[in-house]
Amino acid sequence: MTGYDALAEVYEWLISDAKLTPAEFAAAFDDVIGLLPPNAHVLDSSCGTGQLAVGLAGLGMQVVASDASAVMIRRTEKLAVELAASLRTVRAGWHELPDHFDDASFDMVFCVGNSLHHAEGASGRLAALESMSRLLRPGGRLVLTSRTWELVRAGGSRLDIRDQLVRRNGRDALVIYRWEIAPHWEQEHHIEIAVARVDADGSVLVRSELLSCWPYRYDELGSELHSVGLRVEKSTFDPEVEGYMVIATKA
């Protein structure tokens, strides 16, 4: 999985206003959180800067936050300390998770933030899903969010510049996405994300990173989930909407 180390310092400018705080991020998943038993064991398997993991811990869950990026893990730990949230962190990519946990350790695994496309190709994606499935207890659920890659690919290679500044903690930033769309689905694609932050003294801090990704069709994802023992229970997929959520249950 690709790192995000360069973007970790400015990652809050990439999070939507509605999910900026841990409580708000967790509230976005109220429907699935309501399915959990008391004192549930939950894994946030691509935790980023920790908003969701810390939000879940604030609800009294036993939370583990994992990420392939050491910098993201440090930011998650810092946020947990700031909000006095109790959680465990593990630096690991998806394929490494079974090295850290016994099978059937969790009631729910989250893989959100449009992260799965960083798994390398169909084989890497299947290995990631297999790892997450192994960690779920029977009847446990995987909660996954994804870009609608059918729409992304239809737009072709392009430069997307946000039409307004994003304000976080009194500072503004301009967010830019540059898409490199390969000719074929199975080929490596690229997204370059740049955040230009304007500091109080007028100086501009720019952080950018070129990220590899391997897109997938919605139907392809459904077949892969089924192949690792997960049944799609709910999906918000709409081919005309930019993103969707899938909830899949372990048989």
Image (cartoon, rainbow, N blue to C red):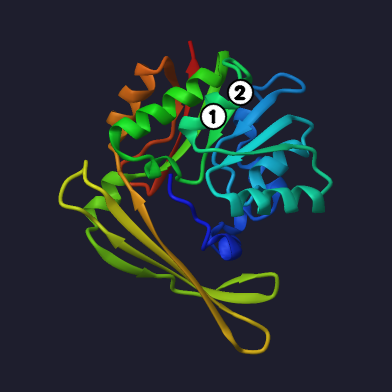
| In front of the other: 30 or 190 | 190
23 left or right of 99?
right
Disc number for residue 101: 2
| Quarter the N terminus occupies | top left
Q: Amino acid at mark 2?
A: Phe
User: Dot 1, how many residues are within 10 Å of its Cα: few (below 14), some (14-19), or many (20+)?
Assistant: many
84 left or right of 211?
right
Furthest residue toward bottom? 202
Q: Amino acid at mark 1?
A: Leu
| In front of the other: 105 or 71 | 71
Callout 1: SS: helix
Residue drawn at 37 percent across, 47 percent down: 241
Q: Quadrant of residue 129?
A: top left
149 left or right of 102?
left
Residue 235's spot in the image, x, y percent?
Answer: 43, 30
Q: Quadrant of residue 150?
A: top left
Residue 213's spot in the image, x, y percent?
Answer: 34, 48
Residue 28's spot in the image, x, y percent?
Answer: 61, 42
Residue 101's spot in the image, x, y percent?
Answer: 61, 23
Say whether marks 2 and 1 touch (CB < 8 Å).
yes
Disc number for residue 97: 1
Residue drawn at 63 percent across, 18 percent down: 105
Callout 2: SS: loop
Residue drawn at 39 percent across, 27 percent down: 127
Q: Is residue 52 above or below residue 107?
A: below
Q: Is residue 185 above or below residue 38?
A: below
